[in-house]
Structure formats: structure tokens, C-alpha cells
Amino acid sequence: MKIGLIGSGGREHAMALALMRNPQRDRLFVYASHINPGIAAVTGEVRMGKMDDVASILAYFNSVQPDLIVIGPEAPLIAGAVDQLRQAGFPTLGPTRAQSQLEGDKSFMRDLLKRRVGYGSPAWQVVTSAEDARSFIEKVGEVAVKPLGLTGGKGVRVMGVHLHSLQEAVDDAAHWIARDGSVLLEERLVGEEFSRIVLTSDGKTAPMPVAQDFKYAYDGDQGNMTGGMGAYTMADGSMPFLTAEDLNKADRLMQDVIEALSEETGEPYRGFLYGQFMVTRKGIYIIEFNVRLGDPEGINEMTLVDCDLPQVFLAAAQGELAPEALRFAARSSVCKYLVPADYPDNSPNPQYFDLDQNAVEQAGFSLSPASVAQEGGRWKTLGSRTMAVIGLGEAPGEVSAKIETLLAQVQPPELRHRKDVGDELIVQQKVERMAKIRAGENL
């Protein structure tokens, strides 16, 4: 099978490995924003281009004539790549441009839930002036301030975490209003977040293991929001702070959104849907939807894949998904990103470093290169998350501890990571915290 892949990050590297487990049968053709050394090791077929340049994407795959195209990042989806690729006759896994508004426009997402689903949202309002922002905050209390467009997971600021007074929140809202004309304010929720990603096609849905992402830059959820510093999954596919009812409610909401979005756009949804949920004392709420595989969560899940992924993805792209065909190993996983010291700020000066990939693999772990290049025999940072270290095992705490032992020996001094991703004590604290929240205790 000739497989097309769009993207060049750690997520796409993990996808490439999962798609190329049968290299005697399959070939991979990649359209990328930069040469990812890990992806290049899987295939020499890489074409460079901008992620939102649909004409260039179409021209490349017209020359390749793949049997299947899989899209990793959000930019080509929001730019309408799926619409053009399908029109050209290529089975393509991903939502259309109209459906991608679910991620690309946060007000569209909230409005869709309000009009067609009727539940799942906290109190929210799109405001266009500092006065309206102040009025909403005074009414609901603490809020999250969310720019309406794409921010790579780095634009949201939360009262009580980043914003420490009403005036700071109003000023932050005013900043985005000055830039964009409006900003979304949402009631701050107290609970535990979790990520549920599904593969869906023509109403049929195959769930992936639940993951928990660590979005803040530093241990203990300190610092600014990032694209995600790491994630873990459990061997049973859920989270220890979730009940079966919690997960059923989240899955029902996702199914209702898929149906609503398909009806809204008049076309079946074929691709990934990522729900970032919060479980609270009052129930399950949706924080955001993404219309693609998550990063880092997708790295965890692609590493756990236990099936013929190209065949599953092709069936989904053609509207013929058999949900039971998408299978995952019953193991826990931990993914930790190594990042430049000043991340999530983008440093104009690249860092050169050494990291022995063979040593990582000999210790039983794997690397997913992301925003990194190789130059003169050394690694070179490209400004964002550099590379992920991934491990599997019986429990995330065990895996996390082993990764820490490894990184204490091999991590370059130019990079840093969050040590608490998947840590046994941190996971137990989350379970205890959620039990107190359910009991109505003040934290």
C-alpha cells in the first residue's frame, strides 16, 4: 500500500512507525514542514512545504498517487486539504474544512453544543469589550480566557493559576480583543482533566485509551501552558480517578457531537476526534475538541497500537470502519518531552546537543524526534518540543521511574523535561484529590 502522511512532529513520527510495521508491503510518502530525522529513517520519500499550502499538498500527492492519506496536524485540516484530496479521489483520513471549525473556532464549538447537543459546556460567553468581560467574570467568578483561533495549546490563561485578580483577567481579555476583536471566556472548572480520542467514520466510533496530558511547562503544573510536556495511559484504558459512568458520559458526548457536526455540515466525519474533558463534582464537561490525533497523547496511543493500522485507517477513510479492528496493547505508557530551556517561548538561537538514541533503545525505551534536525552528526533544536521519550510497562509509575533513571544518565544539559509525568505519587494524589472533590470538600 502506498501511504501518504502529512506532518513532521513527534506525533507524525509515532504515526509513521505504526503505519510502517510491514515495510515489505507498504511504502510511506511524507509531506512535511521540516525533515524529521526519525521519519526520514522510515522513508526517504519526504517533500517539504507549508502545512497550509493546499495546492502544494495536492500537487505532491497527485505525483505520488497514494492509496491512503493520513493527516497529522491541524493546519492542513483547517486549510481544507481533506476537501481537495478527496475531490481528487484519494481516500483521506481527516475531517473537512467545515468540520475542522470545531477546533479552529472555539466559539463555533460552543455554539454547536448549545444549538445541537444541549449539554457538556460550562458557562461561557464571547465578549468584544473589556466592560463585557468584567461583567461576565463578576457573574460567574473565576474564568479561563481563551483566544478564539489556534494558539498551539499555549494561548489559554486561567484565573487562580496565571491570572491572580479580576483586573488581570480583564486586561488579558482586552489584549485578545484588541488583536482579534473578541475573546471567549469560560467558567473555570475544578476537577481532573483527561483526554479521550476516537477514530470515527460515518457514525461508527473506535475509542483509544484514555490519556492524561501535562500541559504546564514545569513540575507541579507550574509555568505557562505548552503544547503538552508529556502524557500517560493506564493498562485498562481508563484513568484511576474516573468511574465507568464518567467515561460513558464522555463517550456519549463525543458521539452526539460527531452526529451534530455531520448533520451541520451535511457530510460524514471520517478521522480522529479528540475530546479534552474535565470531571468535576457536578459531572463531565468538555474543555475543548481537536479534530486530529493529540500530541503528545497520540504518541502514547500509536506506540500501543496492536493491529494492522494501514488497513484500519483505509477502511475509516472509505467509510467502512469496523471499530473492533482498532486494537491496543493492554499496557501502560508514559511519554515525556525533552524541550529547550526557554520553551514554550521560541528561542531564535538553536541549541546543538548530543543524545545517544541507541542507549535509549537499549534501555527499553524509544524516541520520537519532533522539532529537531540533525546537522554535522549532532542534534539541533528548532525551537519547540524537541523529542519525546516513550516507555511501556505494567503501571505508569514504574515506567516513569525507569525513564527518570535513563534521563539522569543521557539527557543533554541543553534540554529539560517534566519529571512528574506519570509519577506514581502524582497519580495517587490525583485520585485522592478527585475523591475530595466528589465529596464536596474545599481544596
Image (cartoon, rainbow, N blue to C red):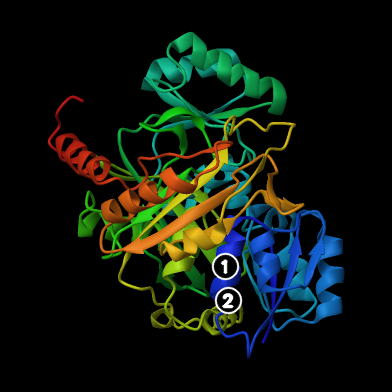
- The answer, for residue 416, to whether it is visible in the render is yes
Pick out the residue farthest to the bottom: 25
x%, y% of residue 82? Answer: 71, 66
Amino acid found under the numbered disc labelled 1: Met
Instruction: Give the alpha-carbon distance from disc 2 to disc 1, as whole Å.
Output: 6 Å
Nearest the camera: 92 or 386? 386
Amino acid found under the numbered disc labelled 2: Leu
Q: Which residue is mark 1?
A: 15
x%, y% of residue 341? Answer: 57, 32
Nearest the camera: 213 or 23? 23
- The answer, for residue 194, to whether it is visible in the render is no
Pointer 2 with pointer 1, Cβ within 8 A: yes
Query: Above or below — where is 9 with respect to 122?
Result: below
Nearest the camera: 411 or 320? 411
Determine crowd level at label 2: few under 14, some 14-19, many 20+ residues with C-alpha closer than 10 A.
Answer: many
x%, y% of residue 363? Answer: 41, 61
Q: Which residue is mark 2?
A: 19
x%, y% of residue 298? Answer: 49, 59
- Which residue occupies 40% across, 29% down? 187
- Which residue occupies 43% across, 39% down? 418
Query: Above or below — where is 80 with respect to 118?
Result: below
323 sits left or right of 14 in the view: left
